[in-house]
Amino acid sequence: MIAILGAESDSGKTQIVAGLSYIFQEHNPLPFKAQNMSLNSYVGVDDGEMAFAQSWQAIAGGSLPYSYMNPVLLKPIAPGKTEIILFGKSIGTAEPKEYWKNYKKKLKEIVFDFFSELTKKHRIIFVEGAGSCSEINLKREDFANLELCRRFKIPFILVVDIDRGGAFAKIVGTYELMGPKEKDLFYGIIINKMSGDKSLLSDGIKFIEKKTKKKVIGVINFIDDLNLPEEDSMMFHRKAMRKARKLEKKTHKKILVKVIKTPYISNFFDLYPLTLDENFDLSWAYSCSELDGADIIVLAGSRNVFTDLKFIKDQGFDEKIRSEVKKGKFVIAICGGYEMLFEKIRDKWRIESRNSREIEGLGFVKGDVNFRKEKIVGWETLNVTTDWFCGKINGFNIRHGDNEIKYFSNENIFGCFLHNIFWNDDFISALVKKFGLKNKGNIQLKLKNELKKWANHLEKQVDLDYIKSIIL
């Protein structure tokens, strides 16, 4: 076992675990993150909900994703209100204080008991920490970082993002906040997202190695053209924009895709395949004017349809969408975005609604969406017939809203409850063809190529023999 912990959030832990999983896939590694907070969720092969990050780490390691790889998933659904997913199933919502008082300690012991059994069945487990591993105000009941390592004697590597500055201070500060037993399990440091000449770090590296008595086992250069899935929507957007700037230099036609960026947008990994395909130029739309010129407008998933639909109306996106549809522009709506297309959404259980239990939809689809008390979660295959695509779409449900119309299609609109639709090659091929272009390959193969590129880069920039000596 080995844990990859961070000196901060978004230090690159997720991608490093994915890369190591790919490198060591012949040993059947298991990715594990005890607690994750994310609206970017997935459904494992056990039909349990989990963070998308752990699902693609599993895929990188050549295994199937199971929800127990991320036993606790927290999903913010409103200010001060978070949904708690335990081993793939929702167990309700809580305010932050309530979560700490009534849930955290119990969940910690549940997860630790489970992890104890997991260690008996799996030789290699890549543990990913959550956020900063040394937050002293959270440390007492934090079961995703140092407490987990201490309880199970897991050696860990600390990852720091140098791109945001203050890397050496963050390393030393994190070290100083550790207890003696934690320092004994501290096996090395990775400096991530380096741009420029590594030799400029030599004095700093000498200092922290002397100060902490821990080895810097790698300085990883930032790869500008690497395109791996991101957990953070802003990082996803930045990568999409970098790709768009590169495509501007090319002469072939592109399909301009604009995604309305709502406050509770979820499962934006649905859109990731479009960033791998050079036929598409994708970016967020923060205002109505940014929809101008779009070939496809996307209403993505939402963890609070009521709040996001009100946002769409308040910002004037509803009228802009109607105007663009009349001009012949195409709209694709996924899950929560699809629910918005109906005439009315009702939430008698107050799962998402606050002041009112119902809200007027956009009215493109006849009928109402009614929220079920129990969440609908699981994989499903739809047989779809449209004027541009006929075939099967394999995807999964994560929703409370329900209507018997599983998908809707007319000349200018396509919507369905399923996530994962753009990961279906036949569907992508048909969509590209609809706009007069040709599809350029298999999505899964493109993802594997990105993973291979990342793994090769990681092998060259990190002391892999040192890591092998820890885990093998």
Image: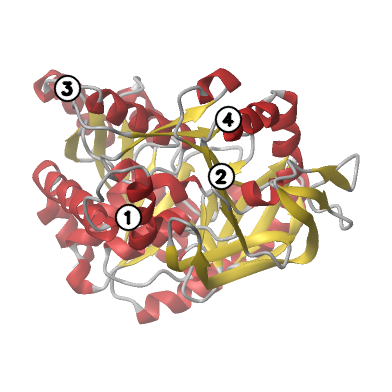
Q: Amino acid at mark 2?
A: Ala
Q: Is residue 127 visible?
A: no
Q: Residue at x 80, y 50 (%)?
A: 345
Tell me which label, 1 or 4, sits earlier in the chain.
4
Whether tag 2 and tag 1 are in contact, CB under 8 A, the answer is no
- Measured Cα–Cα span from mark 3 to mark 4: 52 Å
Q: Residue at x 76, y 54 (%)?
A: 366
Q: Residue at x 54, y 73 (%)?
A: 47
Tell me which label, 2 or 4, sits earlier in the chain.
2
Q: Quadrant of the N terminus?
A: bottom left
Q: Residues within 10 Å of mark 4 (few under 14, many from 20)?
A: many
* Label 4: element kind: helix
Identify the residue under disc 2: 300
Identify the residue under disc 4: 324
Task: Tell me the mark number nearer the camera, choosing from 2 and 3.
Answer: 2
Identify the residue under disc 3: 201
Q: Amino acid at mark 1?
A: Ser
Q: Residues within 10 Å of mark 3 (few under 14, many from 20)?
A: few
> Residue 76's x, y, as percent?
66, 45
Identify the residue under disc 1: 429
